[in-house]
Image (spheres, grey):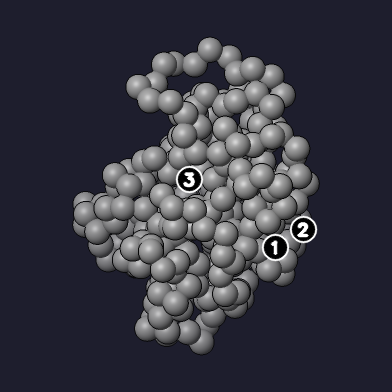
Amino acid sequence: MARTNNPEEQVTPAPPGGDQESRPTSLSRRQLLTRLGALGIVTAGISAGFDLLSYRDDAEAATLPAAEHAWVMVIDLRHCDGCESCTMACQQRHQLPKEQTWIKVYPMTDSAGGTFHMPRPCMMCEDPPCMYVCPVGATFRTDTGLVLVDQNVCIGCRTCMAACPYEARYFNWTEPAPVKRLPFPPTPEMPVPQKVGTVGKCVFCADRLPHGELPACVSGCPMGALYIGDLVTDVATNSVGQTVQLSTFLKDNDAVRFKEELGTNPRVYYILGHGQSIGA
């Protein structure tokens, strides 16, 4: 994957709200995996006034020049029960210590005093502050929009950790425990094992996506609350085989993005549905 440091055009956030419980299934999972093929991500503006055509046009305009696909993650908070299976699946696949939760599940309180759960992976920002402050270029964006870390370049200054408004980065203080031998050396797409003195983070299982496989957190969610989607092919799927037309799914359910006001243009969308607020 080629690197790029070019920020992308900012987009308009979706309005919060929505209480639909339906999950459209206009495409089969087999059709989805056939259409996805290779990896990429980009976000587009969502608002109640956008029709499908303008939504797709925005997605195409925002896509990096060399990208054939534009991936996002969608998290449906209506169906998350806080089981943390996504966290455990991620830790198992990347052989992480218990203290490293690349996708962390936060207990939250809604406006009525009730509780809900909010998974937080890396937001894969279009304008990532972590990348801009890295003094050695260890943090970079691929031509598909993934924000990754080259641990062979990282000097462990932790400036990126201070810059990340989502607290989605972790410092490797100690040598990793012995891990299961892999048939290839660690890469930014599959950083196993982690390297002491460097920073690690969620990678959306970047090594899986070119093969049409789900990220570990998505496949590990028994509730089907997490989706991986591509705005170019306009489809998304979850662990229980539900496939949706992505643009319609986001627009009809008033999807929002976390801390949108910061201008980072995160590539993770949340569906609320119960009056929750995911503000700071």
Rendering coords of residue 115 (x, y %): 69, 50
Rendering coords of residue 153 (x, y %): 60, 37
In the rendered image of this protein, does residue 280 appear above or below residue 96? below
Marks 1, 2: nearer the viewer: 1
Q: Earlier in the sequence, mark 3 or mark 2?
A: 3
* Residue on which disc 3 sits: 204
Please give the name of the residue rendered at 36% of the width and 46% of the height, measured from the top-left corner: 209
* Residue on which disc 1 sits: 259
Nearer to me, 105 or 5: 5
Rendering coords of residue 158 (x, y %): 75, 39
Q: Secondary structure at mark 1?
A: loop
In the rendered image of this protein, does residue 212 appear above or below residue 244? above
Mark-to-mark CA distance, 1 and 2 = 7 Å
In the rendered image of this protein, does residue 141 appear above or below residue 195? below
Residue 5, label in figure: none
Contact, mark 1 vs mark 2 (Cβ under 8 Å): yes
Nearer to me, 102 or 14: 102
Contact, mark 3 vs mark 2 (Cβ under 8 Å): no
Please give the name of the residue rendered at 38% of the width and 25% of the height, measured from the top-left corner: 184
* Residue on which disc 2 sits: 280
Mark-to-mark CA distance, 3 and 2 = 23 Å
Rendering coords of residue 92 (x, y %): 49, 26
Type of amino acid under label 1 = Lys
Q: Residue furthest top?
A: 178
Type of amino acid under label 2 = Ala
Q: Secondary structure at mark 2?
A: loop
Please give the name of the residue rendered at 31% of the width and 52% of the height, measured from the top-left corner: 38
Type of amino acid under label 3 = Phe
